[in-house]
Amino acid sequence: MLKKRIIFTLLFDNGQFMLSRNFRLQKVGNLGWLQRNYNFADVAFFIDELIVLDVSRGPRDLDAFASALSRISEGCFAPITAGGGIDSVEHAKTLLRAGADKVVLNSALTDRPDLIRDIASEFGQQCVVGSVDVKRDGAGGYDLYIRNGSYKLAMPVSEALSWHAEGSVGEIYLNCIDQDGTGQGYDFGTLDLLPKGWGLPVILAGGVGNAKHFAEGLAHPRVDAVATAHLFNFVGDGLKKARHSLLNDGAELAAWEDLAAVDLRRHLETVR
Amino acid sequence: MGGTHLVVDYGMGNLHSVVSALRYLDIDPEISGDPARVAAADTLILPGVGSFYKAMVKLEESGLADALREAVLGRRRKILGICLGQQLMAEYGEEDGGRRGLGFFSGSVTRLSGEAGLKVPHVGFNTVRFAPQSRLFAGLGEAGDFYFVHSYWLPAGERPGLAALCNYGADFVAAYEHENVFCTQFHPEKSQTNGLRLLSNFLAQ
């Protein structure tokens, strides 16, 4: 049986990694910081997938982002998705060459559907993740936002989602701006925006503060993957403990031995 | 375990993660698409993502197909095929009108049946059941989770060398091992410690 997934999202902005709250960014540190203070190499062994987003608000430095992505991917033995401001097939190719397995696009879903089609036809539909940012409208519904949550579209969210489902994306990353970075749990109301007969995998994002929120997301029949971008909610061995407790409680997650238990290099030494 | 390791580069897909996984295991592989380098290597790794037909055209035209057949069938060099690499090792692939493969084992690579509304491609971690005594899966128990991305597969059937099965609507070959020929439909380099353990088992052969 195909497993559900826990996804970690890293937010990158001009050489720095960021925390986001309602899409407002706060700097936490560079790649060295991430490694020293967060032991990312170890954390990467307790996730099913990694997403790395260039969320720079100003001009993006693709070379710097690709170089950071490449360094991150050297120690991550799980699928990696990358994106942020992808504006050409060549841009997508640069990220795939730097270690990404998939690319994620947001503004282009509505601004440049031709680009989504071109990327899917070049690398396959399974390679394209559509990111959809929504915000509660105060009247029980949701509005659709693009460009880092800065621009509201008039198009109803469910209409945009129907359009994506017929298009060239392989899965959807559904993020609720109101919940983003709050640690208050997912907004499951966003799942009601999915049109009838929706067949693509759904990654639910926005609001995770603890393992219980992951469990609620994973238990939901419409959710294939749960994502968090909140570094500080899972410091130390937080993610490892969360994963173990979810597996013990019967969550439909993939299982593998902890790195320390396997100690692969020593295993090789003994057979040399 | 000693000798030179070569990752075959024939322009199909990203070699980055395979190379990273090997380096993690303290192996610094050569990356080359030169048939002469393939001929010189002790251990070969054949990764790849994409179309069987296009890949075979590239392997035949570059002379890599003959170099691989000579190294594997002639000089019995150890090889690991990954994803498309597994499919290319079969006799025949039906993708894009059909083409002869490298022919390291019998069977035809066909499109996933996608039964019961299952999505194609098959993407994600799925459970793989190992054959007892498998060398690739030594130390991993009877079953384990590995990461797949594919639209074509080698249907399960009676064949010598079946090392593991996976089920996605129907059983298919998740891994094969026979003498010096090893391959997996899943991506060990994307399968966390399960995949690293498998790679280390392969390298130790």
Image: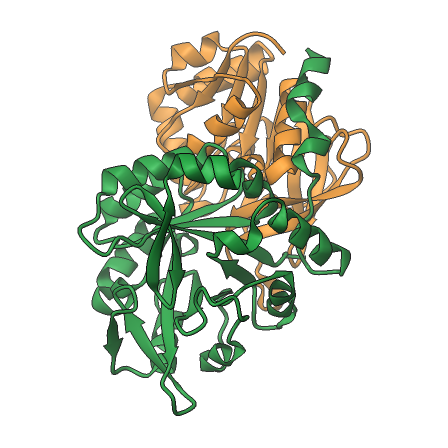
Chain colours: A green, B orange
Residue B148 vs residue B55: left or right?
Answer: right
Horizontal and vertical percent position of residue B108: 57, 41
Horizontal and vertical percent position of residue B64: 41, 20
Q: Is residue B45 above or below residue A40?
A: above
Q: Is residue A184 above or below residue A129?
A: below
Residue B199 vs residue A160: left or right?
Answer: right
Residue B129 vs residue A8: left or right?
Answer: right
Viewer-closest of A248 and A98:
A248
Q: Is residue A235 above or below residue A144?
A: above
Observer able to see residue A13 = yes
Observer able to see residue A195 = no
Viewer-closest of B184 and A271:
A271
Q: Residue at x 47, y 36 (%)?
A: A35
Horizontal and vertical percent position of residue B141: 79, 37
Q: In what quadrant of the picture does the C terminus of chain B appear?
A: top right
Looking at the image, which residue sits at the far bottom? A139
Tell me the quarter of the picture where residue A247 sits.
Answer: bottom right
Residue A3 vs residue B22: left or right?
Answer: right
Horizontal and vertical percent position of residue B112: 56, 54
Tell me the quarter of the picture where residue B201 sits.
Answer: top right
Q: Residue at x 77, y 30 (%)?
A: B139
